[in-house]
Image (cartoon, rainbow, N blue to C red):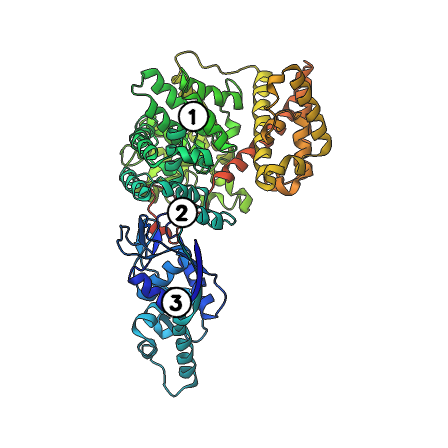
Amino acid sequence: MGISTHNSPIDLLVQDVKDRHLQLPELQRKYVWKSTQVRDFFDSLYHQYPTGQLLVWETDDLPYNRDVSATGIGPNHRRPQLLLDGQQRLTSLYAVMTGSACKVRDRTKRIEIVFNVFSQRFEVATAVTRPQSGWVSITQVFTKGVLPSFNELGLDLTSPEAQQALENLTRLDAIKKYTYHINVLSGLTYEEVTGIFVRINSGGTRLSNADLALAQVSSRWHGVTEELEEFQAQVHKLGWELDDSILLRVLSAIATNQATLSQFFKAGRNQELTEERLREAWQRAKPAMLQAIHFIKQNCLIDWLSMLPTNYVLVPLAVFFERQHQVTQQQERDLQRWLYMALIWARYSASSEANLDQDIKTLSEEHPVGHMIQNIADRVGPGRRVTERELQDQLSNSPFMVMAYVLARRGEAKDWFHAVGIGAGQDLEYHHIFPKPLLSPRYPDRAQSRIINQVANLAFLSQRANARIAASQPSDYLPSVEYAWLQAQYVPTNPALWTIDRYEDFVQERRKLLAEGINDLLASLMNEPAPWINDWAKQLEARLMAAEAGLRDLIALRLADNGGAHAWNRYVPSDIQQAVRQRIDQRIKRNPFESDQYDTLADRLAQCNFGDYAKIITSNWLIFGNVFSDKMTFERQMTSIQDARNAMAHHRAMNEGEQHTAAGGLYWIEQCLMLAARAEDDTEDEGEDEAENKVLVRVDTRAL
């Protein structure tokens, strides 16, 4: 192994890229920088700020590689240097300084950055950044030269401002001589280099777990990225977008029976995951994922992946179809029920990987789908009904919006004015039944936007129908809509509720209708009568069990993220640690075979009392404060729940006031947990121009 260093100016690096002497190994991720990041990068270069180093690998053992420009992928038979660290910077340099198109998130585009010769500011090019205002394209400066760019400004050559502009353009052109320090690795195998790549990138937030897992897979299977991209292109034709994370989880689940990406990092497991085994698992994974997609679209009536609050449901579905060569009618109905329940009760939010692996493990049992349904029931309580109150404050990104769409599709809903059936292939929008201009004066605060934008005020319409309604009052336009078409979307048909003064009555009634529709749908997928719990005390007990599990999952997730292997000793109060240790010792004394079952954070938290969870959270408020907002309110609501648990444990009947207090506290905790789970799943939208990102179900932006 050898490590050498040298310095190289930017213009020579760009020439190496052009000559394909400097390329990307397969383990590198795709180009993801936004134009604003490129703008800031060139600003740093212009001011001679430090922008890091580059790491390259020089080897005769060439893996599958691609051009730094990322516009195309293909094998290369030269002996290049392969860029390990610095892809985003060097791709940006090449694209801007040569004027080449760049493939950004599956879309080829040019990166247009402009420079103001007077203010020395860099900006992303827009219609107003014209030469007359002192703006010049930096690509033109690098490709055509300083003087042609200067001449386009039309300045008086004798003026002081012209001389200053020329000096600034010359300084801009000097970016070509900005020097990078380059570390060169030689004499290493591709697997060794992959390990270095993972190590240098795992300390920060630049790469996701999927990026690092793909690096590990590619060290054994050269060409895997092209396989993934070909399948992603095939799925794209179906109107779906699948990221590497989901594909790798399905691959892992089929190859190892576990969906965690860490499977690719385990030393012993890594030796078993040979290229042959990975290829074989991938060939089984592709048709299984396609079948899962078609099942979600055709059987479950969810036409677009973008509607799902989580893509994780695809993983168990794909594994099921890979293992089941023939699916019965009962299994089909159970699968539909499982998928709807998994979405409604946020099966893959908190502790998502643990829940994924639990479900995948049950797929090897005799009645796999039934066991997956039972896994959900164990968490949320048996016979759990959806209630009107649970739809309060739910927005378009919630699972209840998905269920509203499913109900509309099952009811053969039609566009309200054109009688065209709602479904795939249409450019649908979420229409505000009571438009925002009518409601904004009543709910002016930003915090009240949830009242306006809740699921109960949204319906599915075509863009044409939505434009026709505009800001009309429901009492003006709903009378012209067929009642059957309103009923198909569970819109209250009582005209008395269509006035602005009755808005809150309207959304409450629609929440009731939607909740009843969801419960009826789940019941229709069962051969036996739905096991709804009608007894109030049993309903409350089921919800308490679910809330306790949710709190435990949240604590395990947050403490592990902050403390890793030391989370238990670092964050759990000593008196709770001692009490749990005593309980575990007593259990092991009775059952010695359980001695190795209490080592993990989750195992120990499971031995805590309900009140312990409140103490752990309040003593670590910096970690949990963004979930529960107000510490005093949290303590008060937890106390009301604890009182209800104690009453149930001692078989003491609660009076009506105690019941309402407990239900209110429980609802508050449930909403906090639901919002926290949703936040864990949210990913930042990296699109720069909303008009460039085609969406199949669009929000009515006029009303938001």
Residue identifier under label 3: 10
> What amino acid is labelled 3 in the image?
Ile
Q: In terms of secondary structure, where does tag 1 sit?
A: helix
Q: Between label 2 and label 1, give the one nearer the viewer.
A: 1
> What amino acid is labelled 1 in the image?
Ile
Q: CA gap, disc 2 to disc 1?
A: 40 Å
Residue 306 picture location, percent across and down: 38, 39
Residue identifier under label 1: 360
Q: Please tell me which residue is depicted at 41% across the width and 29% down the height of the picture.
A: 256
Residue 581 picture location, percent across and down: 69, 26
Q: Mark 3 or mark 1: name the one nearer the start of the chain.
A: 3
Residue 29 picture location, percent across and down: 39, 49
Q: CA gap, disc 2 to disc 3?
A: 44 Å
Q: Nearer the viewer, residue 347 or 703?
A: 347
> What amino acid is labelled 2 in the image?
Thr
Q: Which mark is residue 701?
A: 2
Q: Nearer the viewer, residue 57 or 305?
A: 57
